[in-house]
Amino acid sequence: MTRVVALAAVLLALVAPLSAQTGTADQLRRARELYEGLEFERAMPLLRQVISPQWPHAVSNAERVEAYLYLGAALVLAGRADSGVTYFRAALQRDPFSDLDAQRFTPLQLQTFARARRETFALGARPVAVTRVDPRTQRVRFTIVTTHDARVLAQLRRRDSTAVTLLDGTVSGVQEVAWDGLLADGHLAPPGRYEMVIIGRSSTRQQTDSARVFFGLRHEVEPLEDTLPAHAPGELLPERRSGWSAAGELAKGLGVAAGVLAISSALSSSELDAERGPAVVVAGAAALTGVVAMIARAANPVIAENVAANQRRETERRTQNDTIRTRNADRIARTVLLLAPAAGTAP
Amino acid sequence: MVTLAHAATAPAQTLTVAALLESTEHRVDVGFGVERSSGLLGGARIGATLAPRVHLGLTALGGRFTRDSSNAEDRDVAELRADAGYRALPWLTFLTGVRTRTYTAPIARQRWTALQIGAEARVALLDGHIDGVGRFLLLPLVSVSDLEQPELAFTAAAGMDYHLGPLTVGVWYALERYDFPARDGVTRREQLSGLGLEATLQVLQF
């Protein structure tokens, strides 16, 4: 039994908002049917109920604007054009994109609505739709509107106060504003949250108005390659010889000298003996060479071949990195912008 | 009588020519005391590196030994040598070759022919601008006019090579020794030793 009660409570909780929405929509639908049946006097009370603060159901801005428009249209047909203008203005103030379909409304209604436009100054911008734009060939398009002629400044702003002016001119009615995806410095706009602000001053009524829409911007770009890191010290060849290297040169010279003396003594026939003079000369030359080599090595321990090899490796690394950067730049140049609407009150 | 013939220092295919000068002392004992003679030998060598590890060479030497002891005699000397080497390691080259030498005295001529097998080792100083060189060759087959095959025959040498661009200057000490089997209680021994100079020029690289 407890389960049944709980289930019923859940169902009621789900149905209540639905019925609230349905209540306003039904009311508007009935009002439209009466209006189209030329029963204006019966339609108007229904419409007034929708815009009344006592109306118990939720009313969206679009529903409220529709109620204002039909009320204004009904009042015009009832011969109360001034009142009609009031409701038309109310609709325009809530939604500057409001308009009457010329196929469904009379010339008098259209004229009255045009008068409401002239007497009301409002401007608006359509929310940004989810959009995918290749900035090389396409443009991001924003739709703005003014109720009548106005001087309008449209700017894109970022959190860091970067601003791009998209429009600075006169606008009357609906107008598209195109953006090439670049910032003022010519670079592609970075990912982030943006705000498009439009500020307008009426050309006829000394009134100003502003509107703004928020959107998020993302980049769709092929994964970039990492550049090659700098060589770690252990990856490069040693460029200087150790202190033992000089001693090694001396040891080699003395080793050859010893070999010469060994040949002339140990390998020669003891019975024949051998003249020692030439061996001493060559051994002396070898030992002297070792000493000179040791001194030269100590004076210049730099390993020129290794220095050159390390420089070649570094040059190759830089060349490869330049190539990688070029490829990455190509990929970045093919970046696609992804726009999506965003909520908020600041960029 | 032994030259340090630059076994295979050149890494590419090369052609070299060289001039040689040897101050050689010859000693021989045939049972009547040591006969000593000496002289300068001059000659030339042409070498070719046919592959990165293989070289061939041909050397010709000639000169005259004059007697330094009363029991010796003056002789003309001529020698022709062909050798080949295989560089097994950067510092080690295996060598083989044949040599023929002729001593010509007023009353006789003697020909020596030998097969040589051995190795040469090099140590580089100052990044290869100088090489210390040692060489040992056995002569397992030696043919000497009117003499038996020696029981022991070898040559050994050590010295330095100084590389100056395409020119290499070498200085070395060499010893060549032959011990013959005893005959009638007498053992014949011969030995040549001396100092050699060689200037080698790389004339072609291809």
Image (tube, grey):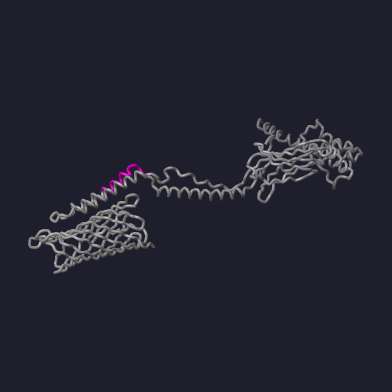
Give residue B121's position: percent from left, percent from top: 28, 54
Q: Quadrant of residue A23?
A: top right
Give residue A152's position: percent from left, percent from top: 77, 40
Instruction: Name the quadrant of the C terminus of chain B.
Output: bottom left
Instruction: Name the quadrant of the N terminus of chain B.
Output: bottom left
Q: Is residue B1 positioned above or below A44 on the image?
A: below
Give residue A6's position: percent from left, percent from top: 67, 31
Q: Is residue A1 positioned above or below A220 on the image?
A: above
Q: Is residue A326 positioned above or below A208 on the image?
A: below
Please name whichever residue, A292 or B190, is drawn nearer the observer in this view of the structure.
A292
Give residue A182's position: percent from left, percent from top: 66, 45
Q: Quadrant of residue B74?
A: bottom left
Q: Is residue A269 positioned above or below A129 on the image?
A: below
- Whether residue B152 is visible, yes or no, is no
Overall secondary structure of the magenta section: helix
On the rendered structure, is A298 left or right of A130? left
Does residue B190 show up magenta in the picture?
A: no
Please name whichever residue, A43 or B102, is drawn nearer the observer in this view of the structure.
B102
Residue furthest to the left in view is B184
On the rendered structure, is A37 left or right of B77? right
Give, as a single range, the part of the protein colored magenta: A241-254
- Whether residue A105 is visible, yes or no, is yes
